[in-house]
Image: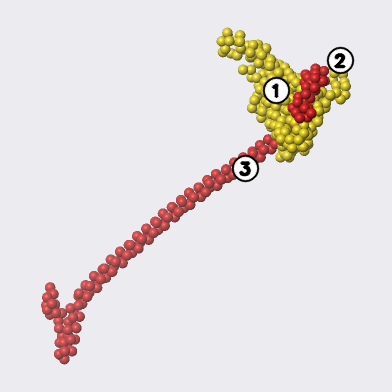
Amino acid sequence: MLRYTFPFYLLITDTISASEEKGGMPQLNPESFSSQIFWLTLLFIILFLINHYFFLPKIKNIRKKRDETIQSYLDEAKNLNDSFNSLVDKMDKEFEEVKNEQNTLIKKTFEENKKIFDKKILEINNDFEDKKNKLNSDIDENKKLITKELPKLCVDLSDKLYEKIMGEKKKGSVNDFKKLIGDDK
Amino acid sequence: MAGPLAQFEIKKIIEMEAFGYDISFTNSSLAMIMTVVFISLFMYLGLRNLEIIPSKKQSVVESSYEFISGMIGDNIGNEGMKYFSFIFTLFLFILVGNLLGMLPYSFTWTSHIIVTFSIAFFIFIGVTLIAIYKHGIVKFLKFFAPSGVPKPMLILLVPIEIISYLSRPISLSVRLFANMMAGHTLLKVIGGFVFVLGANSFIVGGILPLAFLIALTGLEIVIAFLQAYVFAILTCLYINDAIHLH
């Protein structure tokens, strides 16, 4: 009864009885040592040889191959990147050249146009000046002519007025008219 | 009911003898063969159709490769790549041995001190030979007497250094063995609780220890990985010490 109500007791007695039967821990029984050492040595050497000559070289090779593949892809990517960068550089350079050329052309065209424009302006100014001078001289001439002709016209006009009013013809003289308006000099 | 230590018993399957030594094929040998077969199968299936863009299986195998490669790179540097195959095999061998031991009715060969000690002793001898080959015996012996230490202190320090160096295989092997043994013993004890408490309380009493057992199994799986990792990383550190004596 005690045996079933106290499991600890059961286990302890079992442990003790097992140890007593076999002379303690089985690990310390030297009878099995030679067999264990033999099989351990044999099997460990077999496993080592299988790993060393068969499995591990396979892993090494595939890893090497993988590294090489990755490296080749990296190299290819680097080359592509380099060629892309050189193309971008070339494009930038060409773009810069075109920009410079464009600026030069704009500047040149602007200067040429400015020259043409200045020339035309000068021509127009000169022409304008000429025409102004001519006009002034014409005006002066006409003014002189009018000044010269004006007394005679006035005398003729006054003669015609006299005839209309008075009903008789009378011929006035320019000199008298000049005396009358005080311009007889 | 069998005791918690009964699971570690070595049972002979085929009796064999060579040069007067018993080399019988036992349950431990079978578990080791299963480990080797499992690792070989894992590697074979993962590397069957190698692709530059890896499949899921290939990724798993390659990630284990990268894991060990990173461990060696971090702890030893490029010089350590010479020992890659050994550390890789060692890590997988212990890891799969630990994990297969978690299967019911299987056998955890890493819970045997003679196995872990053999591996650790081989590493110890190997590391010592590497150090002597690389630096010569005089430089190697100077490793036990750090430079810049006052001479009176050396009387105390040299024996400590020697003991610490000699205890490396012991600490390395006992760590793995003790963890595995303790874990599996605990699982067996808690498993016993489930059975006994469940049988005596109409199943209800077994629920709590069962939940604990499940949690503990998860923990054991983590420990299985952790111990393999610790074993491999300490091997790396010892090799690093041998290559760059300081």
Q: Is residue A32 left or right of residue B78?
A: right
Rendered residue at 72%/25% (across/down): B182
Residue at position x 33%, y 64% in the image = A127
User: Among the chains, which one is yellow?
Assistant: B
Q: Is residue B23 visible?
A: yes
Given the image, on which type of amino acid does mark 1 rest? Answer: Arg
Question: Chain A's colour?
Answer: red
Could you say where residue A15 lies in the image, as x and y percent from the top left? Answer: 77, 24
**Which mark identifies residue A80?**
3
Q: Amino acid at mark 2?
A: Gly
Considering the numbered disc 2 on the image, is that residue within a helix, a strand or a loop?
Answer: loop
In the picture of the structure, the residue carrying the numbered disc 1 is B175
- How far apart in space, not on screen, are marks 1 and 3 (Cα)? 57 Å
Q: Position of residue B60 (x, y in %)?
A: 72, 36
The residue singled out by tag 2 in the image is B20
Give the residue displayed 52% in from the left and 49% down from the top: A95
- Tell which subunit mark 2 falls on: B
The percent coordinates of residue A82 (x first, y second) are 59, 41
